[in-house]
């Protein structure tokens, strides 16, 4: 029985009869394949990743598990359509706090058609991408019972300044984010979510080290997804915070060159998160 | 007594009665200030750098020493014009091998005027910048007595592919570069110039570590200059190879964000040089 994902913060949505991803109860995510080269490139990427022995084992945890493709009834009722099947990375979470961050100051790839290039370039210049090396594509935060749930408008979070991004990254790990917007975020979960040997910063640094070396793929217009569960944090111990890479419709071959665009962007994000951990 | 620099591999040249930099016998380099904001921005950068206590001492060696400005007769005979005075980084060298590498896949800055932005974007897409994260702006190599001197045409070296850049980086540290172009470069000086605790790679890694942290300046359209003297290498011991940053006419304030564009580019260059050191 397929249903519409409850915890989606960015991308096309299947709600309101549109074409979008579906999930099942066993923890699988069904993403409709775009009919053009985007769909075939994403399948090609997952297929290549599965079999590429040059990708180290400790890096594979950053990618959703890939289960293949399947022809399914599309969410918009338009009929049968091939879907990518992969791990639903928020499956098992009750109240996940999620942030989708599109990495890179440039979201287009060198060989892109002129109209796609112009569209991406315009958006990169209008959003945080050009100045910060990444843009927040969407987020939701579960605070404590009193403050509840915060899911800001997508268009607005894409265009934040450096100071505003710092504030959002603080609110993302605060228990009082959803209350009065003028309230100073308490950053209560910062050290358990961002810090520590298994926290978000450590995971991003592990990814960064790989990007300094790997010349297999260039991850154009790809996102880092950060997920954690407030309940786990409050119980103490590990926050279970996870970094996942998603959206591979514009991945191209690296041809012996590192992905300097992705690397620069992830280093910028790392700097923002480091500052939050070191500045009380 | 001012004269035209002998060892200039990129940038405007004072030869043939044009406007360009001059040098003297005491190791100073006189760069005519462009009348527009480029000139004022470069002076502003050197002035800021001189007094900025947040720039660590071990990073200052990567910048030419700044001696101020002076009004001088311009090289093109157009009359008096303010000049930047700085250290001539190849002074004291008899046969310097020099490479000028413009860092960054993007040479324009976010607030650039539309026509400048369009011109830079076009050039970045036509040259290696977009794909590699840097482009070689020019170079000269002194080989042994038989092979002599090699100074390829500037236009050609800006558009190299990854494999061609690797070949040029190998020829740059070879004793037989200038002979038959079909000859395999011997990479005789690779380990002494690129390798070792004081070599080019170590210096680039030191710069990289600073760029992962510093949010003071964004070095748009800035170059890394690599200089060494073949005679020093042949004598054994340290090659005296040096990395310098030059050309600060498009440096803007970092405003709390790392220079992800420069950082990505320098990481790409580091990967190329590392590969040469590890691949015989």
Image: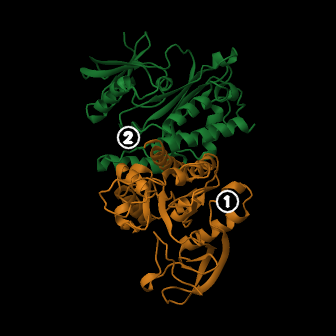
Chain colours: A green, B orange
Residue A66: % across, % down:
38, 20
User: Label 2 neighbourhood size at 10 Å, few (<14), some (14-19), many (20+)?
Assistant: some
Give the mark count.
Answer: 2
Discs 2, 1 touching: Cβ within 8 Å: no
Q: Residue placed at 30% from the left, 49% from the top?
A: A115
Q: Residue placed at 64% from the left, 45% from the top?
A: A163
Specify the farthest residue to the left. A79
Q: Residue placed at 47% from the left, 47% from the top?
A: B268
Label 2 chain ID? A
The quadrant the C terminus of chain A occupies is: top right
The quadrant the N terminus of chain A occupies is: top left
Q: Please indicate, yes or no, whether residue B46 appears anywhere in the rendered image.
A: yes
Taking A189 as reference, is A14 left or right?
left
Q: Are marks 2 and 1 on the same chain?
A: no
Residue B271: % across, % down:
48, 45
- Whether B218 is drawn above or below B69: the answer is above
The label on residue B60 is: 1
Q: Label 2: which residue? A: A254
User: Label 1 neighbourhood size at 10 Å, few (<14), some (14-19), many (20+)?
Assistant: some
- Whether B77 is drawn above or below B238: the answer is below
Residue A181 falls in image quadrant: top right
Residue B65: % across, % down:
66, 68
Residue A250 falls in image quadrant: top left
Label 1 chain ID? B
Q: Between residues B77 and B195, which one lies in front from this camera angle?
A: B195
Residue A273: % across, % down:
63, 37
Q: Between residues A12 and B38, which one lies in front from this camera angle?
A: B38
Q: Residue placed at 31% from the left, 60% from the top?
A: B181
Report how far apart the C-alphas of labels 2 and 1 lie in the structure. Answer: 34 Å
Element type at mark 1: helix
Taking B176 as reference, is B32 left or right?
right
Element type at mark 2: loop
């Amino acid at each position: 029985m397929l249903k519409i994902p409850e915890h989606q913060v960015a991308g096309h949505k299947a709600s309101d009869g549109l074409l979008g991803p579906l999930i099942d109860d066993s923890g699988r995510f069904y993403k409709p394949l775009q009919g053009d080269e985007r769909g075939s490139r994403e399948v090609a990427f997952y297929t290549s990743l599965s079999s590429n022995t040059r990708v180290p084992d400790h890096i594979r945890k950053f990618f959703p598990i890939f289960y293949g493709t399947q022809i399914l009834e599309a969410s918009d009722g338009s009929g049968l359509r091939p879907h990518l099947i992969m791990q639903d990375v928020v499956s098992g979470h009750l109240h996940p706090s999620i942030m989708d961050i599109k990495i890179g100051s440039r979201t287009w790839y060198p060989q892109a058609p002129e109209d796609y290039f112009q569209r991406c370039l315009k958006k990169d210049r209008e959003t945080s991408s050009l100045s910060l090396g990444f843009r927040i594509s969407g987020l939701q935060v579960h605070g404590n019972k009193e403050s509840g749930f915060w899911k800001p408008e997508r268009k607005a979070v894409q265009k934040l300044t450096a100071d505003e991004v710092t504030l959002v990254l603080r609110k993302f790990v605060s228990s009082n984010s959803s209350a009065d917007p003028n309230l100073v975020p308490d950053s209560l979960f910062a050290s358990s979510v961002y810090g520590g040997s298994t926290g978000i910063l450590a995971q991003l640094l592990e990814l960064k080290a790989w990007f300094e070396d790997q010349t297999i793929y260039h991850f154009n217009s790809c996102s880092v997804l950060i997920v954690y569960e407030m309940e786990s944090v409050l119980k103490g111990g590990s926050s279970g915070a996870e970094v996942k890479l998603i959206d591979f419709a514009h991945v191209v071959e690296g041809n012996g060159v590192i992905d300097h665009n992705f690397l620069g962007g992830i280093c910028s994000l790392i700097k923002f998160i480091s500052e939050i951990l070191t500045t009380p």
